[in-house]
Image: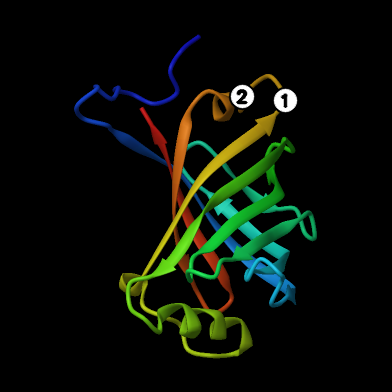
Amino acid sequence: MSSVFPGTSTIDEPKFEFAFEARLQFAHTQVIQNMPSGAGRGGVYLGTGTFEGPKLKGKIVPNSGGDNALFRPDGVLGLDARYMLQEDDGSLILLYNAGYIWGRKADTMERYNQIMRGGPVVDFSEYYFRTTPKFEVEAGKHDWLMRYVFVGIGERLKEGNRIRYYAML
């Protein structure tokens, strides 16, 4: 089995290699507020999107899923997203994204949540948006996605999310 990326991490020095960037546009949202646990649950459904990087390029399969985010009482947004990617060669790739978004200032998440309602974009430096994606794909050209640990760094834009994915070597 050959390595897709050059280099390797050491126990003392992790190394990452850029894999691809996804740009997601949302179709609509739904929210369950004030559950007995004190949390809320938000459904953010994907409309369209694209992804591109050195090893992959394609589109987000329209309406193939979304994020069922948990709005925790401590202000942390827990991500739980699943949706399909379709590589330009036709390969389908299921992406499962878990992660967290939280604000670095007291009012950040309140402002962050207003973006979906037409509010201004919050500067990337004001929040932490990280994911740990997992992939499922047929054996073959893209099954390397199922052999690496990935980390995603996200940014909320007006039209949706931009997430850059890095493989840990």
The percent coordinates of residue 56 (x first, y second) are 55, 40
Q: Name the mark on residue 103.
A: none
Res 17 quadrant in image: top left
Q: Is residue 145 above or below residue 1?
A: below
Q: Measure the alpha-carbon separation of dots 1 and 2.
A: 6 Å
The amino acid beneath tag 1 is Glu
Q: Secondary structure at mark 1?
A: loop
The percent coordinates of residue 72 (x first, y second) are 56, 66
Coloration mode: rainbow
Q: Residue at x 47, y 63 (%)?
A: 101
Residue that mark 1 sits on = 138
Judge by depth and name the residue closer to the eye, 33 or 146.
Answer: 33
The amino acid beneath tag 2 is Asp
Tag 1–tag 2 contact (CB < 8 Å): yes
Residue that mark 2 sits on = 143
12 displayed left or right of 138: left
Judge by depth and name the residue closer to the eye, 141 or 47.
Answer: 47
Q: Residue at x 70, y 40 (%)?
A: 94
Residue furthest toward the left?
A: 12
The percent coordinates of residue 43 (x first, y second) are 73, 67
